[in-house]
Structures are given as C-alpha cells and as structure tokens.
Image (cartoon, helix red, strand yellow):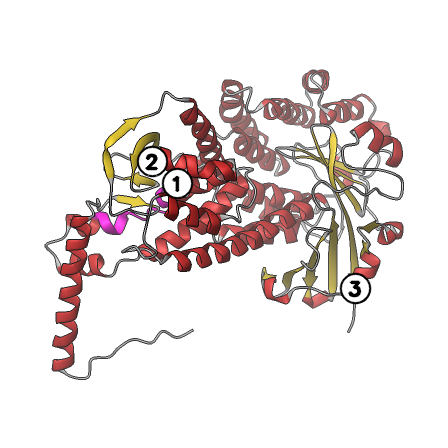
Amino acid sequence: MQFSGYKCRNRQNYLYIKVIALLALIFHCITLKSQNRSFLTLPIIQSENIKESSSENLNLTSDYNHILKIYNKLVNARGDFRYRIPDLYLKDMEGYVAFIDYNTNDIIFEKKAYDTCLKYGDSALAFLLAHELTHYYEKHAWKASFAKKNSDLKIGEKLFYFDDQLINETEADYLGAFLCFTAGFGIFDDGYNLISDLYQAYELPDSLYGYPSKNERKELLKRSAAMVKSLAVVFDFANYLSVTGDFEESYLCYRNILNYYQSRELYNNLGVTAVSSAMSYFSPTELQFKYVNELDVKYNGAKSVSMRNKLLEQAIAQFNAAINLDPDYAPAYLNKANAYALLNEYKKSTFYLNEEALPIALKNKDKFQKTVLDISILQGIIDAKEGRIDEARNAFQKAAELGSELGKENLTYLNNPELFQNAISIKNNPSYMKEKVNGMSLEKFYEELIVDEDNMVELNEDFTIFQDNSHPDLYQILLLHQKSKKKYKAFLITPENYTGKTNLGLKVGDDAEKLKMLYGNPANIVDTTLGQYWNYGNFLVIIERNLIKQWIYYETQILSF
C-alpha cells in the first residue's frame, strides 16, 4: 500500500499551506476553549451544552454498584495490573456520556448515559466502560499530554494540529468491544443504535468537532462489530483446536489475536497450547502421570527432544508475559512450573510452585480453587519423579478427596503402575459425519464446500480460517484449511438455545450424567473458566454448570480439486 501526500511545488504554495494550517490551529484552540475540554480528557462524545453544576457523586447508589460489577469484570478480563486501574465514578452530570480524565486518572460515567443504556442491558454498559478502559490501556492520551507540556516547541504544535482522535475513538470501539467479549458480555452489535439514542438523549447535532459524524460513527461501529466477530471466531477456534489436539494450529490462532489485543489470559493460553504441543513430542512411557494442563497426547517417535524443549521454552516466555501483566495471576506461575517439570528441571519447578504459585493461590483461594488442587498434583508428580513415593501418594490423595479427577487418575497409576496404558488416540468416527444440525451435516458441507471468502482470516501463508455464515441462526461452520497438505478441518456448531437432538437423543439442558449414559466416557475432558469440554472424537460437548450448553461435530478431510 502506498500513501500519497501533497508536495509543495514552490515557496508560494508552501506559505499558503502554512497560513491555512495556522488558521486551522487557531480555530482548533478556540473551539477547544469554548467547549471547556481538557487535553487529558477523552470523552465518548461531547455536548456543546455541558452541565457540570449538578455533578453529584452517585457512588453510594445501587446504580453505581451495578456498573461497578461490570467494570470489575472488564478489568479482570484484561488482566493488566502493571499500572493503577482508574477509579470509577457515576455522576449526575451531562455533556460527555463517559470519559477518562487523565488529570485525576478517573473514569466518569454519567447518569443520563446509564439510563439510556438500560434498554440494551449490561452489554451496552460494558461497551461504554470498555471503550474508556481501552483509551487507558492503549495510552491514547500520550500525544495530548506531550503537546501540552511542549506547546512552546514546534513538535508540540505539530502534534496538536495533527490530531489522531478519530483513530483513537475507532480503536477504542473495536478493542473495547473485544474486551467485552472476553469478559463474558458477548458481542455488542447494537452500538450504532445506542449511539443514535445517546445523540437524541443529549440533544446533539449530527456533527461534533473532533469526532466522526453520527452517521459515520454508526457505520464505523457496524464495521467494528464485524471485526470483533472475526476476532471472536479466531478465539473460539483456538479453544476448539486445543481440545481436539491441534495444538500447533491453536497456537497460531492465539498469536493472531495477540497482534491486536493483549491480556494475561491470552498469553497464558498461548503458553498452555505450546506445552500441550510439546507433550506430543514425548513417548507414552515418559508421560505416565497426567500433567496439570494435559489435553491429549499423540506420540510420534520421529519427533525430537530438541523440538519439545524449544516449545517448552516458548511456553515459559508466554507465561512470563502473563505474569508481567498481572504478578498475582497464580495459573501462570503454575503453568510455568509445569513447563519446567516437563523439562526435568525439578528444582526450578518446585520454586515456582511453592514460592510463587501456592502463596498467591492460597491468598485468593476462592478465585484460584482449581489452581490449588493442580499445585498439589504437580507437586505429587515431582515427588514421584524424584523417588518420594509416600509424599506423592499423599499429594494425589489430597487432590482426589477434594474432587480432582486428575488426582484420582494419578493416584490410581501410582498404586497400580501395571495398569498403565498408552494415551488414548482420538480417531475419526465416520458416523458423526451424518449427524445433522438444523438440516446441515459435515457430509453435506464437504460436498458443497460453500464458505464466505470475504470473512476469511489468514493465520499465515499455509493456514486460513473460513466460515459459512449463510444460516447463522441455524448453525455455524468453521473451516481450517492447510494449503500445503490440502487438508480441511471443519467444525459444525449448534446455535445457542438449540432445540434439536443428536441421533442418540441428547439435547441442550440435559445433564452430564445423561451424556455419559448415552455416549460413555469421553476420550478427554478439558476444563474452562465457565465449564468443561467433553471430547468423544469428532463429537465435542460444551458443558456449563453440569448441563449441556452446546455441541460440535468436527471432521478432517484431505481434498484435491
């Protein structure tokens, strides 16, 4: 892509441009002064009739408690605690909707904006709060601050004139919307309607200085929503690929997201995926015990020790990145210890386990309850590897008594090593090809292979994600294409609140016991922050609160055209 610029052909043209720029700068300053706008304030929109006389603090009200819960979820989802998190205020004032004031490092949410959002639910409140948080995390105020402090210099004048607020506002909409998604508020695609309601509530003209017009902003919000949906698809795909054992492809997905958005969970997930990929480079006899982040083990004797060590070192770097964002994030310390254990560096592993992960997990036991159990399991593995069998048995027993399936499996192996068998290898089951979701099957999809090429995502030169969005209310299909091997892996996903059944009679809302009765024990179970994935080999079931929420059929094909 090439950028074209205006070239001054002679001194007269140059002076003419200087005069125009100076007049624009003077107008800019007058406008800012008349609007009483702080250099270090980034409001969502700004009324010409600002009403600050009644800026009463409403932080002791139920409305404030409502938005504070949403705000805390967003902050925790981002997981970046390197700097002080802005304080949140709900105020009875009118003029800005919501804004972050860098003079006080506070985020202000106006009561009028709160009332306007209510008809859209928590996702609208989260969208506006995430917008302002994104300004903070992306440091959008740095240029204004620099310009203010250096206004007597030519560079300060230039920075002030070439205002990139339009770019910052669009980025805050886009990345803020993805933050909402990762915090569990879904994809808010009513932003353009919300903006219309806010303009009406605040009696704003269609055009505001320093902002896109109302219609332009509505269009930008539509496009941002589409971009967020694409990013969300990559995020979901990364999770599905991890569960189905495609660790290298999952790793590429997480790396793709990190090009746009960074959080401790993403770095941690990237590290876990690298560890899982490394585990496929071990022989079965090297992995008798079930390690704390195990998804699936597929041994290939041709794969080398150097490759697995390289992956484990990459994983440790990702866990360090997560820790740098949040030094109190216990799972990253645990996963780092796990990687060192797989490298047979038990002294380092024990240090990060007992000196870092355990104190943080115990301090926040309600938040990291599962982490506490997994710490005990990993300690048991280290004890067993170093010959402390009684200590290992006690660690596994403790975890098993607290309900850990991983603890039970490791205890069983420790007490009965002769029962050890090679890890289950998940194989394709052609019968799932004929299962249907609202009339669509994987068999039919591969026959037609219709995808939306406008919404494809290229992970690199070899891997591309495609989607079939022709009937989003009936089903969703995601397709991973590996060009070099002509390999396609398709996922047929049920919609939320699906009313249909599988061929064996499973339906949304059934409990895990019925799933086990119909399909038996899964090949592997993967914990998530919301529940579990049960993988039956071409049939993946998503469980939340012990109830069936969704299921996915998947199939790999080698196709030549």
How packed mark 2 is, by other alpha carbons closer than 10 Å (few <14, some 14-19, many 20 or more), is many
- Do tag 1 and tag 3 residues touch (Cβ < 8 Å)? no
Badge count: 3
Which of these two is toward me, 174 or 139?
174
Give amino acid for label 3.
Ile
Q: Which residue is mark 3?
A: 558
Relative to residue 368, is residue 338 depicted above or below?
A: below
Taking 301 as reference, is 377 left or right?
A: left
Q: Position of residue 220 (x, y in %)?
A: 44, 58
Q: Position of residue 528 (x, y in %)?
A: 64, 35
How packed mark 1 is, by other alpha carbons closer than 10 Å (few <14, some 14-19, many 20 or more), is many
Q: Which residue is mark 1?
A: 133
Question: Which residue is outermost to the left?
Answer: 152
Q: Position of residue 386 (x, y in %)?
A: 66, 26
How packed mark 3 is, by other alpha carbons closer than 10 Å (few <14, some 14-19, many 20 or more), is few
Give amino acid for label 2.
Ile
Q: Is residue 138 magenta?
A: yes
